[in-house]
């Protein structure tokens, strides 16, 4: 059924949507604009919206050889390493979380184990704890056992962020798969491992791609863990902070760094979206 | 193909006992239907045979081998689920091939078997579709195909037709019966629909509250119900039950005075201990006739309403305090309301004691076969 609205209502609604979009988009547009400006232009008041864009700021970010000589001063930035770090840590976290979290989610969804709900809630509980609360004691622990500033240590500690999400999301996705389908596979002669491989995982695929994207973003955006527990292996979020020197603030370069940081998840989401086939389980039962 | 034996099988969820002491022998090639109201444990029993539900007590034997602790995957049974439970990410062809792949058959063998099954169930043209592009009846056929493609020892059906509309249900009923004739496998079929049970079964197992009420052929259950429950469950419309009291017991049967007043001599195995005790008389709606011989039971019915089915007409009314349904051969005189006199032969009547058990009839009709 199609509701017919008066034109005036339509106009007002569209206007409201437009305002919302504007409010949301403004900081993004501002950052992108800043990243394309010269240092001097950034500081002018009132701000200019018409200017000659420059890609100089992006060059500074990655041009280690030139030691970041800009028209307005010299900064030495190595932005490639933190990006590599972030990719390794975030991807590693996603992979480890999937390997551990999906089987855990399966057990929580399908098996009758004692204290099931308590275990599930305990896992979720990690999401409630403020990261800063654990990160300071972890600092000394990590230093003592040699995990400080290592990929393994970082990926391990990132599980606090990513694992509960994967456990809970995969649990709810598995609960959506009718149990009959697994039982049918068992009757068809499939042992539990093959049921999971041939039936459960293919049906989970779209959900898991979505969940992986989500936790990749969580890991990508994390700041506190990297700040305290790493230095040379610090993620991109920490590197961005380092552009804020006590002396000179290279706002355009920082904005360029932000743009780069934003672009990578956006690309991933665009690629991942193709796989987010909806309603795959439709037609299985009834 | 195999025989299945249940010896003292029981199932409990914690302290809740859902099946008690089930003894049953299912012969090779038999079509057995488990029937009963919801909550009677019939599906649980089927799932225990299939290996989807753990057995709490007793023994389950397939081909004289105890399989209590054998995995569902290793029992080599085929099952059709109420929900069809097709694999949504696979085409019909892949769905059919799945059990064969699990059995590690060669590619060529899989292809021939899938093709055979598809043509047996007339679904060659559907092979490349995904389940979501199939109608309910087609999904049902795929589910059956997937169960038979592996040529399992026993087929299990868990209310397979309950999601289909009436017309399709009748078609599929016939198709499953034909399939049983063609394949000759042992089939165990669960339903709450007594018509499915009556039309398809070699042997019906009536379950109630986790125990077997009666096992027998459809004919047996219809004509010699062991209890009031079975009598009421099998047959449609339901058997009428009229209250009465035993006046006398003699060789030719028991004399019963109905609450409505009449005295009838019902030919059942006499039991003198019941004299003076209350008893329930059962008459099937189809056993009423308007004509009245001298020995017949006559009942005066206050007409409530009349239901025309075309070929038959049923009249609903009250005899004294009791509701009665009866088949009327001639609908015309029964139009509207008023009183009507119905008659039934005592030989067609059943007697049930207060505990629900039936007294054995002396002249039950001979078997259909």
Image: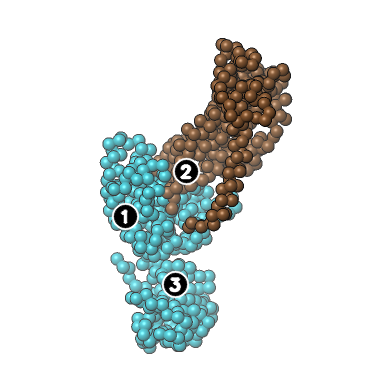
Chain colours: A brown, B cyan
Q: Which mark is residue B343?
A: none
- The crowding category of the residue bearing disc 2, from other C-alpha atoms within 10 Å (few below 14, some 14 to 19, many at least 20), is few
Q: Could you tell whether A28 is left or right of B359 in the image?
A: right
The residue to which callout 1 is attached is B180
Cα separation, mark 3 vs mark 2, equals: 48 Å
- The crowding category of the residue bearing disc 3, from other C-alpha atoms within 10 Å (few below 14, some 14 to 19, many at least 20), is some
Chain of residue at mark 3: B
A8 vs B344, nearest the viewer = A8
Please identify the quarter of the rendering in which residue A246 is found. top right
Q: First in sequence, mark 3 or 1: give its number.
A: 1
Q: Say if B320 sits above or below B93 in the image.
A: below
**Going 63% across and 43% down the picture, which residue do you hit?**
A117
Cα separation, mark 1 vs mark 2, equals: 39 Å
Judge if badges 3 and 2 mark residues of a common chain: no
Q: Say if A120 sits above or below B13 in the image.
A: above
The residue to which callout 3 is attached is B238
Cα separation, mark 3 vs mark 1, equals: 29 Å
The label nearer to you, 3 versus 2, is 2
**Going 49% across and 45% down the picture, which residue do you hit?**
A177
Q: Say if B351 sits above or below B75 in the image.
A: below
Q: Could you tell whether B79 is left or right of A5 in the image?
A: left
- The crowding category of the residue bearing disc 1, from other C-alpha atoms within 10 Å (few below 14, some 14 to 19, many at least 20), is some
The label nearer to you, 1 versus 2, is 2
The residue to which callout 2 is attached is A278
Mark 3: secondary structure: loop
**Going 40% across and 58% down the picture, which residue do you hit?**
B164
Chain of residue at mark 1: B
Number of numbered tags placed on the structure image: 3
């Amino acid at each position: 059924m199609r509701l017919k609205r008066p034109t005036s209502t339509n106009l007002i609604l569209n206007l409201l949507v437009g305002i919302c979009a504007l409010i949301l988009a403004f900081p993004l547009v501002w950052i992108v604009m800043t990243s394309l400006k010269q240092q001097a232009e950034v500081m002018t008041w009132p701000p200019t919206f018409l200017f000659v864009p420059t890609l100089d700021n992006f060059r500074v970010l990655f041009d280690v050889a030139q030691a970041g000589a800009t028209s307005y001063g010299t900064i030495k930035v190595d932005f490639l390493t933190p990006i590599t770090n972030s990719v390794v840590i975030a991807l590693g976290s996603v992979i480890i979380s999937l390997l551990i979290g999906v089987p855990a989610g399966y057990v929580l969804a399908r098996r009758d184990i004692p204290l099931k709900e308590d275990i599930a809630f305990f896992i979720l509980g990690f999401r409630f704890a403020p990261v800063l609360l654990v990160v300071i004691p972890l600092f000394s622990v990590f230093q003592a056992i040699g995990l400080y500033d290592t990929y393994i240590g970082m990926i391990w500690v990132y599980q606090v962020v990513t694992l509960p999400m994967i456990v809970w999301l995969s649990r709810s996705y598995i609960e959506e798969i009718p149990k009959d389908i697994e039982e049918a596979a068992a009757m068809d002669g499939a042992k539990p491992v093959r049921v999971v491989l041939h039936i459960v995982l293919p049906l989970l695929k779209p959900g898991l791609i979505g969940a992986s994207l989500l936790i990749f973003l969580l890991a990508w955006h994390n700041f506190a863990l990297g700040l305290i527990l790493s230095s040379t292996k610090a993620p991109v979020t920490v590197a961005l902070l380092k552009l804020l020197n006590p002396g000179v603030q290279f706002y355009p370069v920082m904005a360029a760094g932000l743009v780069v940081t934003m672009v990578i998840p956006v690309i991933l989401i665009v690629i991942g979206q193709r796989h987010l086939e909806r309603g795959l389980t439709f037609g299985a039962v009834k | 193909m195999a025989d299945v034996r249940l010896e003292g099988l029981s199932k409990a969820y914690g302290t809740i006992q859902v099946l008690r002491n089930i003894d049953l022998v299912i012969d090779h090639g038999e079509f057995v239907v488990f029937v009963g109201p919801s909550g009677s444990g019939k599906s649980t029993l089927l799932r225990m045979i299939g290996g989807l539900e753990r057995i709490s007590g007793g023994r389950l034997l397939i081909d004289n081998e105890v399989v209590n602790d054998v995995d569902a995957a290793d029992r080599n049974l085929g099952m059709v689920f109420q929900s069809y439970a097709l694999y949504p990410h696979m085409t019909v062809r892949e769905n059919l091939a799945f059990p064969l792949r699990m059995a590690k058959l060669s590619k060529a063998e899989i292809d021939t078997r899938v093709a055979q099954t598809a043509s047996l169930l007339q679904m060659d043209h559907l092979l490349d579709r995904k389940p979501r592009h199939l109608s309910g009846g087609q999904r049902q056929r795929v589910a059956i195909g997937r169960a038979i493609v592996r040529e399992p020892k026993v087929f299990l059906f868990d209310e397979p037709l309950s999601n289909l509309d009436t017309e399709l249900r009748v078609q599929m009923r016939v198709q499953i019966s034909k399939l049983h004739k063609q394949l000759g496998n042992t089939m165990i079929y669960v339903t709450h629909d007594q018509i499915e049970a009556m039309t398809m079964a070699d042997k019906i197992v009536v379950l109630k509250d986790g125990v077997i009420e009666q096992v027998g052929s459809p004919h047996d259950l219809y004509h010699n119900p062991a209890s009031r429950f079975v009598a009421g469950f099998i047959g449609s419309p339901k058997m009428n039950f009229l209250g009465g009291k035993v006046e006398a017991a003699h060789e030719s049967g028991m004399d019963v005075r109905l609450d409505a007043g009449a005295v009838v001599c019902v030919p059942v195995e006499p039991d003198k201990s019941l004299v003076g005790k209350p008893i329930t008389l059962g008459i099937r709606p189809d056993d009423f006739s308007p004509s009245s011989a001298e020995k017949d039971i006559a009942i005066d019915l206050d007409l409530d309403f009349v239901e025309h089915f075309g070929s038959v007409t049923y009249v609903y009314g009250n005899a004294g305090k009791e509701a009665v349904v009866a088949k009327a051969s001639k609908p015309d005189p029964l139009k509207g309301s008023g009183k009507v006199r119905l008659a039934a032969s005592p030989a067609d009547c059943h007697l049930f004691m207060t505990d629900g058990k039936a007294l054995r009839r002396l002249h039950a009709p001979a078997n259909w076969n």
